[in-house]
Amino acid sequence: MNRLVYYIISAVVILLVQVLILNRIELHGFLSPYIYPLIILLLPFETPKALQLVIALVVGLIIDIFGNTLGMHAAALVFMAYLRPFLIYINRPISDYESSDEPTIQSLGFRWFLSYAGIAILLHHFAYFFIEVFSFSYLIHTLIKVLGSAAISLFLIILSQYLFYSRKKAER
Amino acid sequence: MRNLLSLLVNYHAFFLFILLELLCFGLITRFNHFQRTASMHSANQLVGGILERTDAVSYYFSLKSTNNDLVAENARLRRQIGNLDSRLKELSLPDYCDYIDDSTSVRIYNFLPAKVIQSTTNKPNNHLTINKGSRDGIKTEMGVISSNGIVGVVQEVSPNFAVVNSVLHKDMKFSVELKNSNHRGSLNWGVQDLRYAILEAIPKHASVEINDTIITTGQAILPADIVVGTIEDITILPGSNFYEIKVRLSTDFSNLEHVYVVDYIYRSEQNELEAKSENE
């Protein structure tokens, strides 16, 4: 129960940071960080697949309503949520996951999280930016956008993990 | 039948995934299709209210540059008033002449000031949300300018807010001309850097030079002689009779705060007349 409350609070914080701060940031005029996929990335391993998809749809639509992009973020996030179990599978440790593991840096380490979140963010940004242009005619421009924005998003996501981590430690 | 059911149960996540993606793409095509791009969500009351409140905070950070812009604009307007006053004195008619042609003295554009509460510059189709709506007399397809140049065209209006298609929109075209030679062309952003746009359809016999000024033509939506930008680069397309000109936009879309919505007073009259002549 405690874990659920903690999860909901962090999801709301992530949404607020995304909508009120990050949506206004545009580096070099076209790079924009999206950290809200973290809400899906932090879901416990045992979350049912169908529930993950529904949560992704709701989170995506909230972001869409604030960004005038109805459906675009939702489509990209549902896509990422669908592929998440596969990412968890290909990143599994040699000794496989233990029942107490969570998809966080403090539970499974920096390298695991980097590869897990890195691939997920790339997939999400790739889907989102191509849905946004809705064509392949600006291919190079869009690819630069995907890679640049993904790098910034990933940096912010890992940074936020360390912020949450230190707070959790202090509580104990 | 049982096989079908077990298939559905085993692959329920996949079917749900397909279903949700279909739903999303339905929304995308329903609300984001070409010119109907601006779905009205940032103009609805709740979201608009939240955005306006957060904008009130971020507004403070740019007060200084906004102020500078306003001061510069004031100065320019004052200079203009001075010039116009002296022109007026030169032109004023002698007392015995009581016939005055009023075709130039009629005011045909109204300028409604508004504040930008949300804007994007990083999408293929960019929009601004402004804090004035139909209650303040704003209607769709009104032009929007800033003190530095053109901004865009009003796309959708709610009672208190309006969404503006910015120049940085891949489907928007503006009719513009060269200040020096009055050759007309069409300006389109072409999905690139927010500082530049592409000017097309200027014929090769026109004399164009780098740093020439580009202005609006004054065809109804926007008044004439509003500065659009300066020429940054000129390309001659092989096998074409036209230049492709890169224009440095005079409006800085990254920090727009105050804009003016341009109300063309005779718009409905002109539209009616044009529609009538097309029908005949």
Image (cartoon, coloured by chain):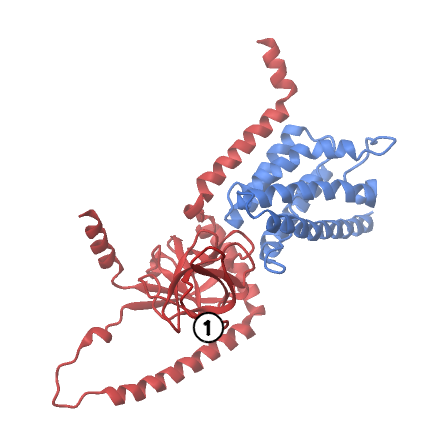
As rendered, which of A43 and B218 lies closer to the eye?
Answer: B218
Q: Residue A104, can we see it?
A: no
Q: Is residue B278 left or right of residue B236?
A: left
Q: Is residue B136 left or right of residue B149?
A: left
Q: Which chain is blue?
A: A
Residue A77 in which image quadrant: top right
Between B216 and A68, the one nearer to me in the picture? B216
> In the current view of this chain or complex, which residue is farthest to the right?
A95
Q: Chain of mark 1?
A: B
Query: Residue A24 at x, y = what percent?
Result: 58, 57
* Residue holding disc 1: B212
Relative vertical location of residue B38 with respect to residue B270 in this rendering, above or below: above
Question: In percent of the image, x 49 and y 68: which residue is there?
Answer: B231
Q: Residue most toward the front?
A: B239
Left or right of B113 in this view: A49: right
Looking at the picture, how far across and down is residue B31, in whole percent? 45, 42
Q: What's the colour of chain B in the image?
A: red
- At horizontal 72% and vertical 41% (from top left) the residue drawn is A119
Estimate the x, y position of residue A94 in percent, counting from the top left. 87, 32
Type of the residue with mark 1 = Asp
Residue, far top: B1
Please report the residue visible at 64 percent of the width from the left and 21 percent of the height from the top.
B11
Whole-percent x, y for residue A67 in the image: 53, 50
Q: Is residue B261 above or below residue B106?
A: above
Above/below status of B100 relative to B8: below
Asked if residue A92 is positioned above or below residue A131 in the image, the reply reads above
Badge count: 1
Q: Is residue A73 left or right of residue B208?
A: right
